[in-house]
Image (cartoon, coloured by chain):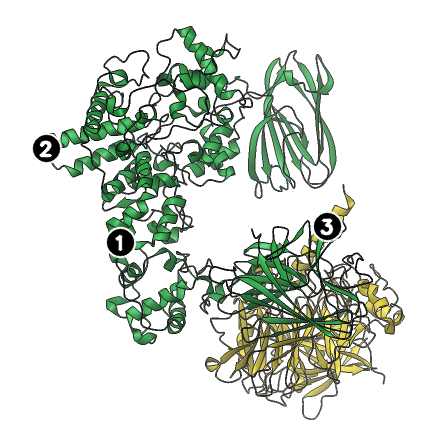
Chain colours: A yellow, B green
Amino acid sequence: MNTQRTYAMLRACLLIALVCTVNGVNADDSLPAPDPALAEREAEFYRIVDLPLPDEYFIEAGSFDVLPDGRLAIGTRRGDVFFVKGAFDNPYETEFEQFATGLHEVFGLAWNGKEMIATQQCEVTRIADLDGDGVADRYATISDGWGFGGEHEFTFGSKFDGDGNTWVACCLTGSYTSENKFRGWAIKIAPDGTTTPMCSGIRSPGGIGMIDGEMFYVESQGPWNGACSLKHLRAGGFMGHPVSFTWYPEAPHLGKPPAQPTDGKDGRMHEDRKRIPELMAPAIVFPYRKTCQSASGFAIDESGGKFGPFTGQLFIAEYTLSLVMRADLEKVNGVYQGAVFPFRQGFASGLLAATFSPKGQLIVGGTSRGWPVRGREPTSIERLEWTGKTPFEVLTMRAAPDGFRLTFTEPVDPKTALDPASYRMETFTHHYWRFYGSPEIDQTRPGLEPVELSADGKSLLLRVTPLVPGHVHELHLPGVRAKSGEPLLHPVAYYTLNEVPSR
Amino acid sequence: MIRWFSTLAAALLLTACDSSASGPADPRPAGKAPATEVSSNDAALATAVDTEPSAEELRAREVAAGIRAMQQRGCIHCHEHDPADAPLLGAKMAPRLSGLGKRANPDFLRHLAVSPFAAVPSGSMPDLLRGLTADERSSAAYSLQHTLLQDSPPFVRTPTDFAAAERGEVLYHQVGCVSCHDPQDGSTESGPIPGSHRFPDLVQKYSHAGLAALLRDPLAIRPSGSMPSLQLSDREASDIAHYLHRGKHLVGTLRYELERGHRRDFGDTQRVRRERTGLADGFNLDVPHPGGDYTLTFDGFLTVESAGDFTFYLDVDDRGQLFIDDELVVDLDDRKKGAKQGQGTVTLSSGSHAIRLRYFQWVDDAALTLEYEGPGAPRGPISGDHLTSHSDNMIVFKESLPWTTGHSAATGDPQLFAKLGCAQCHDDVSVDTAYRTVKTIRELNPTAGCLADAPPDNAPYYKLDPETRTSMRAALTAVQAGELKTPTPGQRIDHTLRTLNCLACHDRDGNGGVTGPRRLFFATHDEDLGDEAKIPPSLSDVGDKLSEDWLRRVIVDGAMQRPYMTTRMPRFGRDNVDHLVADFIAVDQPKALPTPTDSPTVLHEAGRELVDTRGLQCIGCHQFNRNPSVGMQALDLMPMPHRLRREWFHRFLRNPTALKASTLMPDVFPHGKSLAPDILDGDVTRQIDAIWTYLAQGRKAVPPKGLSQQSAELIVGGRTVLYRGKLWEAGWRGIAVGYPEQLNIAFDAEELRLSLLWKGRFLNARAHWNSQGMGRIHPLGHSTVVQRHGPAIAELPAADALWPEDEGRQSEDRFDGYTFDKERRPTFRYRVGGVTVSDYFQDVPATEGGDAAHLKRTLHFSGPSTSAHTFMRLWVGQSVQETDAGYQCDDQLLVRVAGGQIRESRGEQELLVPVPLFDGEVDVTVDYFWGKRP
C-alpha cells in the first residue's frame, strides 16, 4: 500500500467525517426532531416575520449590518452586497438595491460611515460608491495578509473594535491542518491595512464580534472541541487547536508558541489551562445537540427593552437546526463565562448571520445549501420580533461562590421555587483531545438547595454542592412555577464554570 | 444550377448498391417487401393519379423508373453523355474503396467479385467476370483482392464486447437507425417493418472497426447519402457496431467482464457499472483496465484429463472468489484492503467444468494469481490448453466461404481492376490503364449490350429482370430523343424527401411523418414535453418558418436544436441536399413584415420584461441561452431570431396551436389580448417585436432578472461582469472579468498577473453556488490562452538576466484592488517591488473589414524602480515572431505593443517590454488578438 495515497485518503475520510459530524449527520431525518408545540409556545412571545426576497436575486445571507439611514446591508455567499430599504417595516414594501457584486463569499460587513468594509474569503475590502449612483465602483483591498488555498478555508470578519480595526477569524485548511499562512488564527486589520496576527488555535469559526469591548468568536465542534462554543479572542491567546502553531515565526511579537496540550484520554481543558497560560477555555460551551449543532453568527440586544427583557444578552444563530439561542455572559476572576439557554426555533433555513435592527428586531438569515439543515427553505431572511408578552424564563444564571444566582423574568411561586425537588443538575466536561468531538464525561450530580428568594420574587440562590470548576453545569428546572402557576418556557440552562467567584 | 444538377443526380440515386435497396423493377421475387423509398414513391404516384392512369402517364412512370434504374447502375460512368442530360442521368457514386482492407473481410471481397448477386442479393454492382471459367474467376478475384488490399493491414476480428453491445442496442433504437432499418430488439411483434432497408450479414462483411468507421462517417465511404451520418461519436459508433455484431462469438481462452466502481463485497452492485467484455488469455490482469476500483469476472471451462481431487490456490490484492461448476471453492471476499491468499479443494471428474473467477481491485496495489494442483497436474498456473471460453466451441463464422482454401499467392494481372471497368465507378482508386472505348449515351442501342435480352459476355452483367430492362430502354430512348424536362423545385423537393427517406421522420403537406410501429422508437429525455419532444418537426412551410441560414445549417450540417429529442438529425452530405434550401424557399414563399417602429432600446427593455417571470413568463418553460428554465426545459429562446423568420414568429405567438397542433405552448395572447397589458400598452404586435428584437441581440442581451435564481451561469450582456472566486489557473484569489464583446480575462490577485484570456461564454459558478461551494471554476468559452506562472513584472539585475522563477508573491508586493469605469470595466491596482501599476483592459469591437474584436490593455507604471532593467513579460513560449501586424506568440495570440523585445531564455522565447521607470512614470499599451494571423 502506498503511504502517501493512504494518507490522502485518510484526510479525505476525515473531511467527510467533518462534514457529517459538524452537522451531526448527513441526512435531515436524523436531525433531532423539531418540537412544533414548543415553537408554537415560543411564537406567543417572539414571532418570526419573513422578509420576502426578490425574484431576481438569489440571496444567501452571510453577514449583516445596518446603515445609519436605516437600510439593512446584506453580504451574501454569492458575493453580493445588498442594501434594503424598509427591511424593518412592512416586509412587503421593501426595496432591494445591489450595492456591490463580484465578491467572494461575504462573511463580514461593517459600514465605516462612508464606505463598506467587507470581509471576503480572499481579503478585507473597502468598498465605495464614488460617483454616488448607488452602485459601488471602487473596491480597495485593505489587507489580504493571510494564506488562502484550501477548500475549507472560510474567513469571517467582525464589526469594528474600539480602535476601528476589523478582526478576521481564519478557518483551518480542514479540521486537522493549517496548510496556508495564518489558517487557524485571528488577525487584526487596521484601517490603514496594518495586519497583526492576534490569536492562534482556531478550528472553524462561525461568527466573530465584539462583546463588552472585547472580541469573541463562535467555534465549531470538532478536533480539540467537544462542542460548539463562544470563545474570547484575548490578544496572544491560544484558542485550543494547536495545529496552527506553525505560524508563530510569522508573528514574532507573540514570541514562542504555547506549550502543547496534553491530548489523549487524559486531556482536560481545565487542567491544561493551568499549565498553558495562553490557552483560552470556551467562555460558554453550547452542549452538542442539546443546544445546537453548528453555531454561527451572533448579536447583542442593545435595544433597551424593545426586544423584551433580555437587554445586554447575546443571541446566537444556528445553522443545522435553524434556531436561535440566548446566552448571558459574565466575567469572573478576569475570565469570561456564562450560561446558554434555548430561545427560539422554527426558522426557515440554516442561519449564518444575525444582527439587531434599530427597532429591536433580531434579523437572522442564511441558506440551506451544502450541509443538512432543518429549515425547509433554500434561503431566508427573517425578523424575530417581541410580541410584547414576556415569557417566563430564567433571565440570568450567574456564578456565586457556593452555587448559582438565578433571576427570572417573572416573580416565581415561592413554594415550587424553594423546593429542591423542582431542580435537577448534572455537570460534565469534554475530552480535550485531537479527536473529532467528544462525549460528555466526568459527570457529577451535585446537591441542590434553593435559598434566599428575593423580596420581588425574581431572584434566588441555588446552592450547589459541590461546584465543579471546568464543568458545564446543566440545570433543569422542571418544577419551578411563576406566581401565575405557569411553568418555564425553557426549563433548562447550561453554565460553563471556568472560574468560581471567591467569597 | 450546375451545382443542383449533381445534387439531384446523386439524390435521385439514393439506393445503396450493397444493401437491400432496390428499384421497383429489381429482380426480386414477388411478395418480398420493397425498400422504403420505393413504396413511398409508389404511394406518391398513387396520390398523384387518382384513378386509371392514362397511357401517357403510364409511359412517364416507366421512363421515370428507367431513369432511376440507370442512375442507380451508373450508366454514365462508362457511357459519355451530353451535358444537357446531366440532371436526368447523374449517377450515384459507388462506395469509396480506400481503406477497404481495414473494414471488409478479404474473403467477402472475393466472394463479391466472383458472384456479386450471391454476396449482396439486392446489389447494383454488375458481374464483370462472366465470360471466365470458375478457375479464371477465382484467379481474377485474387488479382482484384491483391490490387485493392496490397497495402492494407491484416483484417482483424474483434471479440464482441457485450457491455458495449448493450449500450449500442439503446443507441441503435434511439438515435434514428430504426427510421430506415428494422428494430433488432424483438419489440415489433409483427416482425420486420415493411419498407425497412435490410442489411446483409454484417459479421461476414465487416470487421468491427470497419463497421464502426462506416457508422461514424458513412458519407466518407458512401458519398451518395443513402446511408446518412447520425453524428455518432467514436464510442457510440463502436457500441452500435458491437451490437450489430452480437451473437457471434470468437473462441478464446476465457471470457471476461469488466465492471467499474466500488463495491463493499461481490454482492454489492449499487455503484458498479458494466464497462466491457472480451477475451482474456488467462487469469491475469493483462486485460486493459481502468484506474480506480474495478471488478473483473473471468468465465470459461476447465478441461480435466484425469479425475481426482484438485486444489486451487488463489492469491489476490484486494479480493477474489473462485467458483468451479458454480460451487464457491475459494472465498477471499472480505472487506479489508490488501493482499490475501486462500485455497480450496474439489473433486472433479474428467471432462469440462465451468470455472469462474471474480476479482476486485480497490486502491493501490493490484495482484491476481491462480494456480492449481491435481492428478497429472503439478502445482502451477492453468495452461491455456486446458481452458476454453465456450464449452460448445462456437465458431465465429457459421459458414466458411468455399474459396478460402487452395489459393494463397497474389497472382494475376495488376491492371485487371482498370481493364474490367471497376475504376469507372470506384473512381477513387487510381489506375494507369484506360477502360476500353464504349459508345456514348446518344449512340447506344437500347436493345444491345447491357440492355440486350441476353447480354454478351463482354458487357457488364446487371442481372436485369425484363421489367427493369424495358423501363431502362424506354428511358434511354426518351433521353436520346430529348423528350425529358428539367424538374421544378417542388418536384425536386418531393424527389429528395422520398429518396433520402426524410419522410420517415418528417411530414410535409400531409405526406410522410412518423407512423406505425416505428413511432415507438422516437423517444425523449424529457417526458414532460410530450410528443413535441419526440417527433421531429413538420417540414410543411419550413421555407416560410426557418431563416435561410438556419435552414441550411439543419439540412446541410445536420444542426440540432432539440436536446431532449433522442432521434438525431442526420447529415446527408452537402451535395445531396443543398438544393433543398433554395427549393423550400422558392416553394414556401416566406412573407415579410414591416420594420418595428419602436426604438431598439425600448424594444430591448420591453422584451427583457416580457420574457421574464413577471411578463409573459417565457423563461418559466423555455431555456434562455442554455440556462435552465424554472419548469420544463423547452427549446432555448435565445437562438429563435436566428433560427426563425420574424413573420412566422409573429403568427406563431399569436396562435401557437394553429401552426403546431401538438404544441404545449400556451396562448399568451388569448383573443388577441396580451397577458402583460402594462408593457408597450399591451400592443401585441409591438410586444412580439420587442421579444424578437431583445432575443436577436444574442448573447449580448441583458439576461432577464428572473433567470439569476435558476442559473449559475454568469451571462455577460451589455455590461462587464466581474467574478471573484477559486479559478482554474488564476488561483484562489482569482478575478474573472467578462466583457460585452464576449472576450474574457482572469487576473490572479495573488501572483499579480494576467493568467487567462478566452473568448465566448464567461463562467458558470455552479461549483461555488451549489452545495458546499467546493472546486475551481473553468472558463466556459473557447480559445483559452493560459499565461505562464511567474512574475509578470521584474526588475532584472541586467538586461540579459534570466527571468525570475515563479516563487509566488514577494513581501513587497501588494494587491490594492480595482475601480470600475462607467461600463464597469475594472482597473486593477497593484504594487510589484517599488513599482505601482494600474492595469486596465477594454474590449474593442471588431472593425468592419478589419480587426476582429480584441482586448486593449492599458498599463500605467510609476516608480521608483531600483533597476535600470525593469521589464514586463507579455509572453513566454516556443516562439515569438515579429510580424507587420504585431508579435505572433505561438499560434495563440497576436500581441501588438510598442518597443517589444524578443529574447531567448531557458530554451524558450520571451516577449518583453521595457518599463524604463527610475522615478518617473511609463504608459504601455498592449493589444491582444486571438489566434494566428496570416
Secondary structure category for the residue under label 3: strand
Q: Is residue B184 left or right of residue B824?
A: left
Alpha carbon distance from label 1 to label 3:
65 Å
In this rendering, the answer to whether B337 lies above or below B358 is below
Q: Callout 1: residue from which chain?
A: B
Q: Are marks 2 and 1 in contact (CB under 8 Å)?
A: no
Residue holding disc 1: B661
Secondary structure category for the residue under label 1: loop
Q: Callout 3: residue from which chain?
A: B
Residue holding disc 2: B52
Same-chain check, marks 1 and 3: yes
In this rendering, the answer to whether B792 lies above or below B408 is below
In this rendering, the answer to whether B760 lies above or below A282 is above
Q: Earlier in the sequence, mark 2 or mark 1?
A: 2
Q: Is residue B6 left or right of residue A263?
A: left
Image quadrant assignment for residue A163? bottom right
Comparing B408 with B453, the one in front is B453
